[in-house]
Image: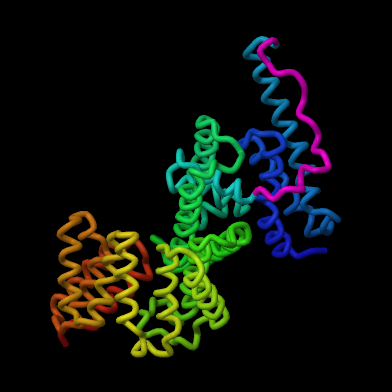
Amino acid sequence: MSSATDVADLLRELAPQVVGALVRHYGGFDTCEDAVQEALLAAAVQWPTEGLPANPKGWLITVASRRRTELWRNESARQRREETAATLAAGSPPDPGPGISDVDDTLTLLLLCCHPSLTPVSQVALTLRTVGGLSTGEIARAFLDPEATVAQRISRAKQRIKASGAEFRMPPPAERAERIAAVLHVLYLIFNEGYTASSGAALHRVELSAEAIRLTRQLRERLPADGEVAGLLALMLLTDARRPARTGPDGVLVSLAEQDRRRWDARAIAEGVDLITATLATAPIGAYQLQAAIAAVHAEAERFEDTDWRQIRGLYELLESIAPGPMVTLNRSVAVAMVEGPRAGLQLLADLAAGDPALAEHHRVYAVRAHLLEMAGDVAAARDAYGLAARRTLSVPEQRYLDSRAARLRRP
């Protein structure tokens, strides 16, 4: 007998392989994916009580193939009622042959789920469902969305892939780099939502960050020479290593400067540092590698006061030169303040806000401004900025943290 947890882990590992095997063999991504979901559900019910089959992947492929055949026949029957028999393709789909499970199509499946015709939110949902093996309900709970909304999102994504005429194959070399970049972006989005939830009562959604790390590990196994894949994995490991210290016993957010670094995950830090060190020495430099290098500098400082802010400032300057963006500039303003003083950071922040009025109202801009104003000794302005930041975030832990910072600066 296997525990439900062990079965769930195995099913998540096997899910993309089974979907890939069926799509490669039969075609029709949407029908195959639906069939695999039903096979996964059957396994989740049967395996914990009846034990694992001798060949779990083969069992899933067989059950999913039978269900896919039923769906295919039902669809064919519907078409026969609506069209003349002469317009229908003759014959039934073949039974899965002995070679159907011999190829690992996980990378191809990831690229399909991150097809450019889909919106990022649809790419995320479809990736978690098809490659991650999460149920629609699990995805909905992770993102605090109604299950019906997520189901519709996934259904529309599959329909859009079908309408686009996308084939289940590796894209041509000319398109491959762009498509892999899209996959990395989706995995990055999943991790970030898990590490700092954008809304709700919880700061972390561990199931999402853990799933992003697992999927990125799988991607690295398939693309071991890709520096950005390695960089993203290192970044996730080094960032997630700080999670145990990010909240206090009462669930209140703890700033980086105040965290007990003894609670950081030393094993994840060691793996992340080794990975980014080796990657920077062998691969063309990229944005994820630079972010991982910044995370490594933080991780290697025994105390906040020991942080090499000059190195971090230099890394942010390099990052901004190859992958400019408002959040990069926002983070660079902190590094500049730590090296040159808070007024220098505030000037950089003012320039950023002036160039993007919409960004100027983002809660993180207010939070960074408040921090730098506090460093500069402008207590009243810092208190007001903390309050404005608290009113603009949808994250309850962040609201509590920002309100507590403002309260500490109130006049007695």
Q: Is residue 254 above or below residue 153?
A: below
Q: Residue at x 80, y 48 (%)?
A: 59
Q: From the viewer's perspective, is 184 left or right of 28?
A: left
> Could you say which quadrant of the image residue 361 lies in?
bottom left
Residue 389 drawn at (x, y percent) = 25, 67
Residue closer to the observer: 281 or 330 = 281
| Residue 114 position within the rendered picture, expressed as x and y whole percent measured from the top left | 50, 46
Q: Position of residue 229 (x, y in %)?
A: 52, 61
Examine the residues drawn in magenta and state their main secondary structure: loop
Number of numbered discs visible in the structure rendering? 0
Q: Do we see residue 208 in this rendering? A: no
> Position of 78 compared to 344: left or right?
right
Q: Residue at x 32, y 68 (%)?
A: 318
Q: Magenta part of the protein: which range?
A: 86-105
Left-right relation of 89 to 212: right
> Magenta includes 114?
no
At 18% across and 61% down in the image, what residue appears?
A: 353
Position of residue 188 relative to residue 168, above or below, is: below
Q: Is residue 310 visible?
A: yes
The N terminus lies in which quarter of the figure? bottom right
Q: Residue at x 45, y 63 (%)?
A: 284
Q: What is the x, y in percent for residue 32?
A: 67, 38
